[in-house]
């Protein structure tokens, strides 16, 4: 009987020892992002003869309290948004290589002043490590896709890249990253 009790106590202490080795990672509560990749894929819609270029941008992220993402209801309410304007939490600024400026990348608005101020800003939903909204460290990747008709706004042969940042629900703003560039293919 004492041997069985000693065996059970040994198993419990081994289990407690193993779980104490598994500590949660320690990340800052302000999100940190890094560039993973960018790729372009061309599609042709069955209802159109004009090809659609889709640019996929993948970033990696780390956040200490895991409060990344907004749902559509939150995006319409304070402190994130209002009845007139929905909030965004993914900021994406486009740049085009300027052949007249020594190959420098300038804002796409330098080339196309008709682009709306918020053309590539978007919203991503909750990225929670738990199902009960507990605060917990979170890391992973996030891919966003942006589709454009060929030639609007980017022309075949133009070289483009993007600057990306994100916000968490506490309105902490991440660092900014830049993607590598890619060239819009010709037909």
Image (spheres, rainbow, N blue to C red):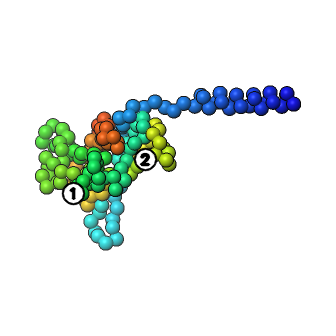
Residue positioned 35% across, 35% down in the render: 30
Of the numbered discs 2 and 1, the one sitting upstream in the chain is 1
Q: Which residue is mark 2?
A: 127
Q: Residue furthest bottom?
A: 47
The spot of residue 88 in percent (x, y) is 28, 49
Q: Quadrant of the N terminus?
A: top right
Q: Which residue is mark 1?
A: 84
Mark 1 crowdedness (10 Å alpha carbons): few <14, some 14-19, many ≥20: few
The spot of residue 125 in percent (x, y) is 38, 51
The spot of residue 158 in percent (x, y) is 22, 49
Please tell me whether mark 1 sits on a helix, a strand or a loop: loop
Q: Give the camera-side residue of 146 and 71.
A: 71
Query: In the rendered view, does 171 fall on the left or right side of 132?
Result: left
Residue 36 seen by the camera = no
Q: Quadrant of the C terminus?
A: bottom left
Is residue 149 positioned above or below 108 on the image? below
Q: Give the camera-side residue of 47 and 99.
A: 47
């Amino acid at each position: 009987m004492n041997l069985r009790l000693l065996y059970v106590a040994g198993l419990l202490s081994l289990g407690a020892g193993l779980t104490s080795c598994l500590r949660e990672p320690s990340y800052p509560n302000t999100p940190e992002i890094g560039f993973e990749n960018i790729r372009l894929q061309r599609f042709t819609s069955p209802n159109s003869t004009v090809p659609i270029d889709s640019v996929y941008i993948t970033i990696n992220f780390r956040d200490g309290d895991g409060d990344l993402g907004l749902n559509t209801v939150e995006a319409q309410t304070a402190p994130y948004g209002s009845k007139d304007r929905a909030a965004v939490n993914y900021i994406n600024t486009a740049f085009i290589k300027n052949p007249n400026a020594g190959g420098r990348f300038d804002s796409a608005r330098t080339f196309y002043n008709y682009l709306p101020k918020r053309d590539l800003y978007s919203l991503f939903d909750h990225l929670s490590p738990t199902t009960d909204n507990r605060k917990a460290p979170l890391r992973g990747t996030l891919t966003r896709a942006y589709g454009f008709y060929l030639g609007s706004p980017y022309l075949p042969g133009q070289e483009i890249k993007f600057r990306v940042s994100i916000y968490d629900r506490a309105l902490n703003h991440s660092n900014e990253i830049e993607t590598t560039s890619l060239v819009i293919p010709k037909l």
